[in-house]
Image: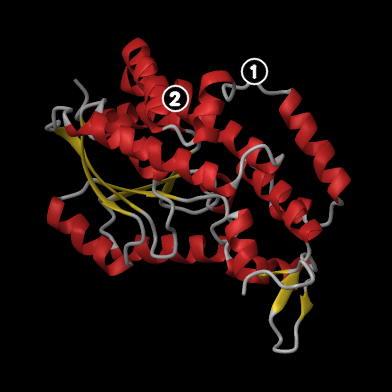
Amino acid sequence: MSVTGLGLLNISAVERETGLAKDTLRVWERRYGFPKPARDEAGERLYTQEDVNRLRLIRRLIDQGWRPGKLLSASHSELQAIVDAERSARVPALLSGETLEAIRRHDVDGLRAVFQRTLLDQGLQGLVTGLIAPLNVDIGEAWMRGELGVPDEHFYTEQVQNFLRGALSSYPRPVRSPRVLLTTLPEEEHALGLIMAEVMLLTEGVQCCSLGPRMPLADIRTSAATVGADIVALSFSAAFPVRQAIAGVRTLRQLLPESVAIWVGGAGARDKLRSETGIQIIRSIDDVVPAVAAWRVANGAAT
């Protein structure tokens, strides 16, 4: 069972509740001394609800660019103070009214109506940069405060991906350079960042081939050669372990020809890979368009 009779949660339940991978929790325990779970008779880790609440705050702050080492020694009240300060500095939340109610009710048609209006008003790029990207942050903060549950967050993510795939299905396939292969490393299962990036790239006339998440490195190399990729674009969620990210990207850099660029983006890319050579960091979804323009200039493909 994932929850004990004493109200303690095992590591699988904590992974589901917080979105933090089991390996990440174990590394933090060993390196930083938190979380520090109890053990049952079989030696399985058991976490309190207080541990889970604190881990939720840590995860959301990591999503906003904070480094784990600065957060894991902070108390729950200190973490909450940081969250409150971050929230007060942000623009007004988009998560309200019709959007919030549609997510809470798991109302597919209601949420799609919100997306459709924004698409008509702002186009595909505006939908991603003006609504979905900031809304992702708002959803995470609402989840952290307990206003939305894990099923609500999963419902939202699934509907965003379905809507964007539908919008792209009728979009003309570009023929201009660069050719971009989109995927994630084998241990990264989150795919929302990939389809958001694909929207931004396709609307700039970029040729895209998305493999979806969790691709073995050898298969990424093979696919890059098959499609003649100029760029391999990877997405990292905030919870992805740092060492795995660095090791995976370094190995992929060795596997790919120097002529194939590697771009990395997502909430987990900014801090984890900032010092890696031969890698271009896409710090936000808004940076995709200028990155494409710069590549075209550098490679003589600008119009």
Quadrant where the C terminus lies? top left
Image coords of residue 121 (percent x, y): 36, 10
Residue 6 as seen in the image, left or right of residue 137: right
Q: Is residue 134 visible?
A: no
Residue 157, quarter of the rendered image: top left
The answer for how far apart the CA atoms under marks 1 and 2 are is 15 Å
Image coords of residue 189 (percent x, y): 42, 57
Which of pointers 1 and 2 indicates the residue nearer the eye? Answer: 1
Q: Amino acid at mark 1?
A: Pro
Q: Are marks 1 and 2 in contact (CB under 8 Å)?
A: no
Q: Which residue is mark 2?
A: 129
Residue 123, quarter of the rendered image: top left
Q: Which residue is mark 1?
A: 92
Category of crowding for the residue at label 2, using alpha-carbon neighbours closer than 10 angstroms: few (below 14), some (14–19), many (at least 20): some
Residue 128 as seen in the image, left or right of residue 59: left
- What residue is at 19 percent from the left and 58 percent from the top? 223
Above-or-below relation of 224 to 173: below
Image coords of residue 158 (percent x, y): 40, 43
- What residue is at 44 percent from the left and 59 percent from the top? 188
Residue closest to the eye, 281 or 207 = 207
Residue furthest top in the image: 121
Q: Amino acid at mark 2?
A: Thr
Label 2 sits on a secondary structure element that is helix
Residue closest to the eye, 119 or 96 = 96
Label 1 sits on a secondary structure element that is loop
Residue 43 as seen in the image, left or right of residue 158: right
Image coords of residue 7 (percent x, y): 77, 66
Q: Tally the numbered discs.
A: 2
Above-or-below relation of 163 to 267: above
- What residue is at 27 percent from the left and 69 percent from the top? 218
Residue 265, quarter of the rendered image: top left
Residue closest to the eye, 299 or 83 = 83
